[in-house]
Amino acid sequence: MDAVCWYPDAGQMHSMASKHLKILNYSLGGLILVGALIFYLGGSKPVKVITAPVERGLVQDTVANTRAGTIKACRRAGISPSMGGQIARLPVKVGDEVKPDQILMELWNEDRVAEVSLATREAKAAKALARQACVKADVADREAKRLRKLRKKGLASEEAIDKADGDALAQKAACAAALATAEVSEARLDVAQALLDRTRLTAPFAGIVAEINGEVGEFVTPSPVGIPTPAAVDLVDINCLYVSAPIDEVDAPAIKVGMPTKISLDAFAKKLFEGKVKRVAPYVLDVEKQARTVDVEVDFSNVEDSKNMLPGYSADIEVILAEQKHTLRIPTEAILEGNKVLVLGTDGLLTERQIKSGLSNWEFTEVLTGLQAKEKVVVTVDREGVEDGAKAISEASL
């Protein structure tokens, strides 16, 4: 049996071509739609941001030092003997605690010791002679009085009375002279003792010996006028410490004595200490011509806080000029130029918002108007794509 071949006619061929064209159009349309969807989804990928909630808390307006401050002792003295000489004795060493008037250094002074010994004996002898002369004057006075009584009874002559009165006056004058001589001897003893004391360097107050410049056998000399030399002994009272820190001249006028202050030290990085301004220097330091500062001194509110500190530690201060408690606040780093912030809404969009700010410091800024509690503001405002109208998601919250 012969095979039968079928060939479509012209109408059928046109119909088949139309169907294939429609299928191709649908396919191309689908591909375009999918591509557009992929492009749209890829182009609107949300940016990741870090946010912080608008909350109530403490905001303080503060002023901080421009350069590192220093822990200083209320009393610190670099002392030296008032005269030159050879060091004969060093009864203390670096790190020793000393009491007031304790000897720290003694120069060779055997000659001075001998002079004091001699002056002491001379003063003692002068006192004895004065007592002797005054006893004689007392006896002479009593004798004159006795003869006057006898004269009234006619038992003594006028001549005897005159002689007794003269002897009494003479002995009285001798007593006065002897007493004056004794006082001169005491004064000479005081001079000798003062010269001896000049060879002994004593502590003017209780403290710690921080440094000693000199050894036994070496010579020390007083500083010539106008030429400073290292002190023989550096004495520090560590029982009273304070902070001295430079404040920029622009901020200094706002600082007043008694203002509360926060103190931080590198040596105690995890602690924050309270203090009060005790002094604002009445002059400007121009150590650096482009950074003129005013020294501000701060006392520790609790003396016990400074017990383990040492003079010379670096320290920073923040003087609290004003504060608001339980006020709306946001991190200061969230604020853009022109007092604006970016708020992350519940729809995932960033919205630029104008705010009115109050007190501010490097950490927090008070919000007077423009935000509500629990709203979220963007902190990472410098990230690429973070702008008004952008889609965003919070990867972390402060």
Image: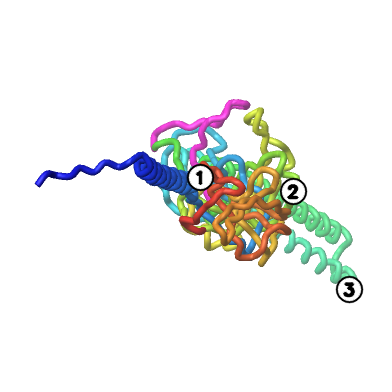
The local secondary structure at tag 2 comes to helix
**Is 362 placed above or below 82 here?**
below
Residue at horizontal 52%, vertical 36%? 231
Is-magenta flag for residue 235?
yes
Is-magenta flag for residue 248?
no
Q: Quadrant of residue 12?
A: top left
Query: Tag 3: Cα neighbours inside 10 Å, few (<14), some, or many (≥20)?
Result: few
**Is 147 placed above or below 2 here?**
below
Provide the residue designation for mark 1.
312
**Is 249 placed above or below 207 here?**
above
Q: Is residue 236 visible?
A: yes
Provide the residue designation for mark 2.
254
Q: Position of residue 303 (x, y in %)?
A: 56, 61
Residue at horizontal 38%, vertical 44%? 15
Give the label on residue 153, or none.
3
Name the amino acid, label 1: Gly
Looking at this view, is 96 or 339 the one in front?
339
Q: Position of residue 49 (x, y in %)?
A: 50, 51
- Answer with mark 1 or mark 3, whichever residue precedes in sequence: 3
Looking at this view, is 253 or 26 the one in front?
26
Residue at horizontal 69%, vertical 48%? 339
Q: Position of residue 93 (x, y in %)?
A: 40, 46
Which segment is the magenta one? 216-237
Looking at this view, is 308 or 340 the one in front?
340
